[in-house]
Image: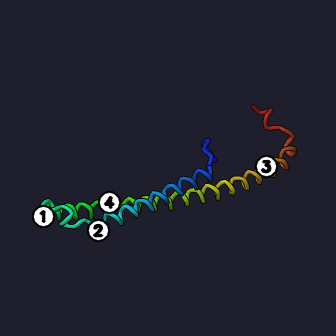
Amino acid sequence: MSGGFEANPEAIGALTTAFAEAQQQTDQVKAALEKPQAEQKDFGRSWQDPLGRDFVDSMGAIAADLANLSKLFADVQAQLGQMSNMMVAGETTQVGVFQEIGSDSGSDSGSDGGSTSGGI
């Protein structure tokens, strides 16, 4: 690749897998927090409104944030996959272009007799 950066498909694959696992774990936590299993008897008087309602609302807000985080992980996964595909396609194209340039330069090298270097 240009600029000294080389694509490492194994590293991109590992990173994609890490984001997939992060998304899965986030979804699991979200599912646990979406609907708290705690009841009034678990907290006694502290569960009375507004504290109990605030607790349930807070868990819902956290679950919504986790849903957004999960979506972000999925988006990053998709972008990494596209980037990896583009890098592989680009490298394949570049190799083909280099092969064409190499074959063209070999046939033209003897045709002008090296006259371009004498004018400078």
Give 1 or 56, whichever is nearer the viewer. 56
Q: Which residue type carries mark 1?
A: Gln
Give how far apart the Cα atoms at labels 3 and 1 are: 80 Å
Mark 2, secondary structure of its residue: loop
Dot placed on the residue nearer the N-terminal end, 3 or 1: 1
Give how far apart the Cα atoms at labels 2 and 4 are: 14 Å
Mark 1 — residue?
48
Mark 3 — residue?
102
Dot placed on the residue nearer the N-terminal end, 2 or 4: 2
Eye-nearest disc, 1 or 4:
1
Dot placed on the residue nearer the N-terminal end, 2 or 3: 2
Q: Which residue type carries mark 3?
A: Gly
User: x%, y% of residue 71?
Assistant: 41, 63
Give how far apart the Cα atoms at labels 3 and 4 are: 54 Å
Mark 4 — residue?
65
Q: Are marks 1 and 4 in contact (CB under 8 Å)?
A: no
Q: Residue 35 carries which label?
A: 2
- Quarter holding residue 67: bottom left
